[in-house]
Each structure stands twice: as C-alpha cells, then as structure tokens.
Amino acid sequence: MNDEIRKSVRRVDAVAKASGLAKYISDYNFGDILYARLVRSTRPRAKIISITVPELPDGYYYVDHRDIPEKGKNRIQMIKDDWKVFAEDEVRYVGETIALLIGPDREKLLSLLSEIKISYEDQEPAYTIEEGLACKGGAIVGDDNIYGEYNLVKGDPDTAFNNAARVIEGTYRTGFQEHLYMEPQGMVGTWEGGRVNIYASAQCPYYIQKSVSGALGVEGKEVRIKQVTTGGAFGGKEHFPDVIAVPLAVAVNKIKKPVELIFDRIEDISYTCKRHPSRITIKTALDKENNITGMTIDTVINGGGYESSTLIVLQRALLHGIGVYNIPNAHVRGRAVATNTFPSDAYRGFGAPQGLYAIEMHMSQVAKELGMFPADFKRKYFIKNGDMTITNATMKDTVKLEEMFAAADEMSGYSKKIREYKDDPYKGIGISFVNHGGGFTGNGEQEIIKGVVKMKRTGENSAALYVSNVEMGQGLQTVLRKIAAKELGLNYTDIEYDNPDTDIVPDSGPTVASRSTMVVGYLIQECAKKLKTKWDEGVGAEAEHHYKHPSEFKWDQDTLQGDAYPTYGWGINVVEVEMDKDTYEVKTTGIWTVFDVGIPMDDTIMYGQVSGGVVQGLGYASIEKCEVLDGKFRQHTMADYVIPTSVDFPQIKNRFIDNPYKYGPSGAKGAGELVFDAAAPAYADAVQQLAGKNIYDIPVTPEMIMGLEE
Amino acid sequence: MAKISFILNGEEVSVEADPLKRLLDVLREDFEALGVKEGCGEGECGACSVILDGKLVNSCMVPLGAAEGADIVTPEGLRETEKGKVIVESFADTGAVQCGFCTPGMMMAAEALLEKNNNPDESEIREALSGNLCRCTGYDLIVKGVKVSAERGKDLW
Ligand code: FES
Ligand code: FES
C-alpha cells in the first residue's frame, strides 16, 4: 500500500504551469482597475509630525488610518495584534505603511507619491540584537525591548556546571534571509456582492480573512478571500500578505472599486519580512571523562519593529535548540528583542534552522576540542525512543538516526574522507543531524487551529475535496488528491481540488509548519473513509472531518512542558567542499542527504522538496547576505541579494528511510521545512573542517574565511 | 510613439507604442503573452525569457524599439510546436515544475540550448540554465527535465 502511494505521478499543475497557461495574480484581468502604492515610512524610528498630501485629481484616493471603519480597529490581527494597519503618530521601521495612494494611472501615482510630504521628529534607532537588548534610544517595547522570554529546564544544569571538569563555549550568529519567491507579493481587492473580496498570492486565506474582518470590524464571512496560483512562498506569504491585504481592504471598502497591489522586486526585497537574525550562545559542561553532563543555550532573535508571530518562532527555535541530542541536564533560554528593522516573520523552518545551526556547529566544535571527529562524537548523544526531551516528555518517535547515518556514510564516504582530508587545507567534508517537529507546537492543532476538511461525491467516479490549504509549489494539490484517491479507490486525477476560496472551503488551517500533508492529509484520509461509507447515497454525498489531538500526546502551553510535537522528521546532510588557494572561493563538490519523512507521499515531489530545500539552505549558509544599513536592507535588488543558480551546487544524492507515523496519511510526516534545516550547518562544518578553525557565523563568505586565516 | 513591427510566434505583428517601453510589457499587455513573467524587472531572473532572433534574452531588458523586424518566440508560441510539447511533457514527467513561476522561462532556455546542442551533458545544461533563477526546485529536476527533453526529442533538434 505504501509503495503504491509513494510512486511518482505527474503533478496535476505541471503542464499548465510549464506552458505558461497557469494564471498568477498579475495575469488576471479585472477590467477597470485602479492601482495602489504604499506610502511608506522613510525613517526607522520617528514621530510623525505632519503629512501633506497634494491635491488629488479626480479618481485618485489617499487612504489612511482615518478610513478604518469605526467598529473596526487599526490593528492587523496576526498571532499578536500589535502591528498597525496604518501608522498614526509614530513609525518603528523603514517601510512602515502610512497610507495607500490609489489611482488609475501608474506613472501619475508615482509622481503624486513623490509630492507627499511627511515631516518626522527622528528618534535614535536600534538595529542589532545588541542595540535592542541595550535599549539604544530608549525601549521601543515595554521597558526592556523584550517581546517575550522562555526558559526550558531539564535535569539540574546548575549542578552539572558546578561540577564540570571543563566548559566549552561558542556564540553563533545567523542573519536575515530573504525568501525570494520568484513571484513577488501581490493581490487584488474588489467590491463584489456588497463586500470586500481579496484575490491573493498567499499561503493562508483564513489568516487574511481574520485580519481583514478584524480591521473592518465585520464577521469573518463578510469578507471573501480567494487564493490564486502562488509563485512560491516559503513562509513569506504566511503573515506578510495580511500586512498589505488589510490596507487594501480598507481602501476597497472606502472606494468600492477593484484595486491592484502588486510589488515589484525592489519593493519586495526592501519591504517584506525576512528570517529572524539570531545570536545563540551555547556552553557545554564536560566531566573528567569528557562526557557531556550539561548544556546551556542562550538564544536571542531579532523581531524587528512589531511582534506579530515572533514569539512562536522563538518557541520553535528553543524546542529545536538542543537538536537531536539527549543531554541529561540542560537549560535553554530564549528572548525575542524589539529593534527598528522591518519586522521579522515566518520563513521555512520558523526558528528551527537558527537553533539547529548553532547546536550542530557547537557539537562539531566540542568534538574538535576533544580530538574527535564530529559524527563519532555526535552519535554518542543521539536521542532515542523513551529518552527525556528538553520539555520533559519522552521521545515517542522510533529514532532511526543510526540507520540513517549508516546510509549517509555509505553514500558519501564521510568517515573515510573526514580522516583523509584531516590535514588538507583545501578539502573538507561536513555533516549535520537535525529533526523537525511537524504541525503546530504542542496542542496548537487542537487549541488554535481546529482544522476541518470536507469532501463530496461529485460524479460516478469523482469526488471533490475542500480544504483551505494551498498549492504554492510544494505539490499539495497532487499529494492531497493522491491521499483521497487511495481511500476512495479512484484515480488522483478524478479528485477535484481548487485553489481555496473562503466562501467554499472550511478552515483546515494555514499552509504552514509542515502540517499540510501530515495533519491535513490525515484529515483527508479519514474524511475519505467516511465518504466511502456514504458513497452509495449517490452524487452529492458529503463527509466532514475534524481534527482531534491524539490523546497520548500531552502539552501545557503555559509552561511549555510535554510532547512539543507528536512526531519529528529526521535528517542528515553531508556536504563536501574544496577551496581555491588564492581566492578562498569554496566550491561544493558533493551533497548527500538522508531523510526520514515517515513515508514519502510521492517520491519525485519529495525529492523536489529535498533538492529545493537543501539548495535554499546552502544559499543561506554561503551567499545570501542581507544587512541593515541606516534601517534599510542594503541588498535590495536581485543583483545584490544573490541566491543559488543552477551552476552553484552539484546534484544531490538522496535516500529516504521509511518510518511511518501512525497519525500521518499512509504514514507520512511533515517534510517541507526539515529539508531546509540541515544544509547550513553541514556546509559551514565542511568549511571549518578544511580551515581547521571554528566558524561561528553564516553566511560563510570568502572574506570570512580569509579572516579566519589571519 | 512609434509603430514597431516584428514577428511574434510566427505571425507578423505591429504595435504603436513608446519605443522605450519594455518588450516584456508589450508582450504581456498588447499581445497577452502572459507566459512571459516578471520576476525582477532588472535582468537577473530570466522569468521573462523569450527567444529573439534565435537568442535567449530577458524581455524586461529589451526596449520595444530593439524588436523592430525581429523574430520573437514566447512560451505561447513554443508550446504549440513539436519541440515545445516535448519540453513541456518532459518537464511535467520529471517533476521539474513546482510553483511554476520560473518554468516558462526555463522552457525557453531549454529550447535555446537544444537548438544549439541537441545532446547536452549535465554541465552544459546547468550552464545554459544559469541565467534563469528558480527558488523552488534546487534545479536538479529541471536539469533532468532538459535531459529528458533532449532524449525524447532527438529527432527534432
Ligand atoms: S523579469 Fe526579466 S530578468 Fe527578471
Ligand atoms: S518552480 Fe518556483 S521558482 Fe522555479
């Protein structure tokens, strides 16, 4: 049965997309459309003193906070609702939305935009984690700039450190990362049926509905959100679309005409959320026999000007902070700090990549201090089924890391090469071990999401599935069809599944957190079983299925104790590199990966996730540099924010190790983020092996390596 | 404003427009060639790739004036040809398509390569695709898609 579902099929969307027939938001024709430009803050931190808008010709509109209906609220209802729809009297970052300027002629809009004069009273901004922690310029948030702090404690770390024979410490830093989905952010708002409709390139139609209805002060169903074919997202179209959908909705609500808001690339890189930068300090306590007895991890992430989902990102960074290891005594502390950078938000991995990068680099460095090779050392501490996790619950997964390591070693020749290259300053091989919890943290699927799916028999041999989860490139429209078809004994092409429309589909939750295949796919599987029993009722028979948290997993969200995730995907990456003697350019010569994703729902689609995720992670590790200068992202074009091209990395050799999960469809687990997590530490480890010096920060650039040598 | 004439997907066409207007906009707005995508507008991503007089170009960097008398092929034209069909089918069968936003441009790059070299090896394919960015696939399956196109279409190119 499992062999059948994993067999690769042709994706349902492939031909239309390849031939250029698929319609993205910029390909629609909404007739007489108006265009919108955002009026943005040019200051990182300031009071707005006055705004002068030029006299607008007929048919042009200026929309700001005063246009929010009285029963509404000038807040974007994200996880936290601190982010304003339109700035009123203060701005906290460059690019903050102050107003929308709308009109029929795009060139005229630009010239009017340049005539809007805003006078500010500037305040001293804080950009970096250090400046945020020091409350440079005075606190932006509360009295300490801390959005939130968590502490996870297992065992007795204090005693472990008091009795330690030796302590090894390192501080690891990661920077902003831009999603750089190929299709920039875009949406169109219309006034149809006496209400606001939003057509968007987005991951989470119901998130947009919640934000828009909250700001307008209407019931959810009084706005309609329709997802259109989405040209990549990676978390960048999880919450950020709310930031533009809400002002757009306020505008449409006011002028009752269709308005298009599509970013060009420079706007998109300059003024959208990025991955949270991090600074993580890890200390390891060792006894006289060089066994790890304790560990402390101090994590700080840069949340930027508003909190939005930052604390959830932080939680995931902490819950993955200790990686795949069983450390008897540990303290993981985390803080998220406010600064005057563009608010950071969701990006594939959601905090886990930062935590996993730090722990993997640290474990390699401790190994080196002890005169051991990284894999030999790390393997001693692999967590096993029944071991205690950092949240004081037992590991419920069957952990197959040893079997996976054997496969990785056999494919890559890691153990042999690491010895061979030991004294070779131009060749290195690195390895990393990761896991990634699928679905929302803890009981979030039960308490927050409460996913619902629906199915219907639509013909002799056909059925439709109704979910709010979107295809954004990951293959969901094919995979969910396969899952439904398998239960119903139909062909996957006989299942209908449209881009979600909140008027039609129930809320099965957002397309995030590697949950769509594992959690929603399971709901579909169970729903399809129900529909099967009703099949004989004829065309029109319907079934519905609601999420129910498996009772064996317990979680306390207040204390963050219990089963943080019902299951984990597991991964190993091996990266081999060579360095040019003169230029310090690093060339990747081999990439081998092994993943436990439960059972892959389609071998080719899963391989596509591996290849895409790993290369995106290698970009993060090596070339994707994004710095803040005077509050602006210094790299804001595709020419200076560079991502991997087809010649930068060799073909990946991958193997899947089967390890079915009881509550996943046909045994599947989450995979979309896992495949990103391991690449950066494997790459940086490979470079530190050849350099013979520790690497702490990514991206690892030739300049950085040159600096190590000096 | 000027009247500019060229051949678009085998048909003679002309348009009255500012000769500085980007060919990308002319193709999308005046000829509904919506397979030509705008990924960056700065010549970096290749989503707007078309074949102009046999050469792969980024249409966002070409002013309309430079298209006078040219022979231009877009995804709309390519997909109707035998070669285009082979590429589309091969891409679909190998899993080369994810979000799809880069894919029409990749298809143009594949066609441009195969016209010159009907039996490319992996490094030649990677080289030929290097002006076209893809953020989803990591390229492996696109490379395979081109390889399979070459095999299936060996009598065409
Ligand atoms: S849109 Fe022309 S190269 Fe990117
Ligand atoms: S498939 Fe999404 S950018 Fe290439």
Image: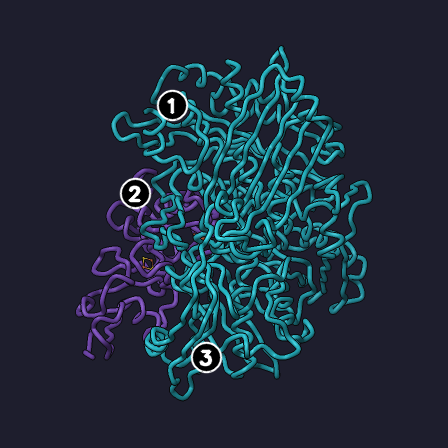
Chain colours: A cyan, B purple
**Residue sitting at the far top:** A289
> Where residue A100 sits in the image (x, y, percent)?
46, 74
Q: Are marks 2 and 3 in contact (CB under 8 Å)?
A: no
Q: CA distance from mark 3 to mark 1?
A: 57 Å
Q: Residue at x 50, y 17 (%)?
A: A369
Q: Name which residue type carries label 1.
A: Ala
Q: Earlier in the sequence, mark 3 or mark 1?
A: 3
Q: Residue at x 44, y 29 (%)?
A: A695
Q: Name which residue type carries label 2.
A: Glu
Quadrant of the snapshot with the C terminus of chain A: top left
Q: Name which residue type carries label 3.
A: Tyr
Bin the neighbour count of mark 1 within 10 Å (Cα to Cα): few under 14, some 14-19, many 20 and up.
many
**Kind of element beneath mark 3:** strand
Pointer 1 residue: A691
Bin the neighbour count of mark 2 within 10 Å (Cα to Cα): few under 14, some 14-19, many 20 and up.
some
> Where residue A68 sits in the image (x, y, percent)?
58, 77
Pointer 3 residue: A62
Residue B127's disc number:
2
Circle nearer the viewer, 1 or 2: 1
Left or right of A342 in this view: B154: left
Which quarter of the picture shows residue A621?
top left
The answer to whether residue A567 is above or below residue A367 is below
Q: Are marks 1 and 2 in contact (CB under 8 Å)?
A: no
Circle nearer the viewer, 2 or 3: 3
**Residue sitting at the far bottom:** A58
Bin the neighbour count of mark 3 within 10 Å (Cα to Cα): few under 14, some 14-19, many 20 and up.
some
**Kind of element beneath mark 1:** helix
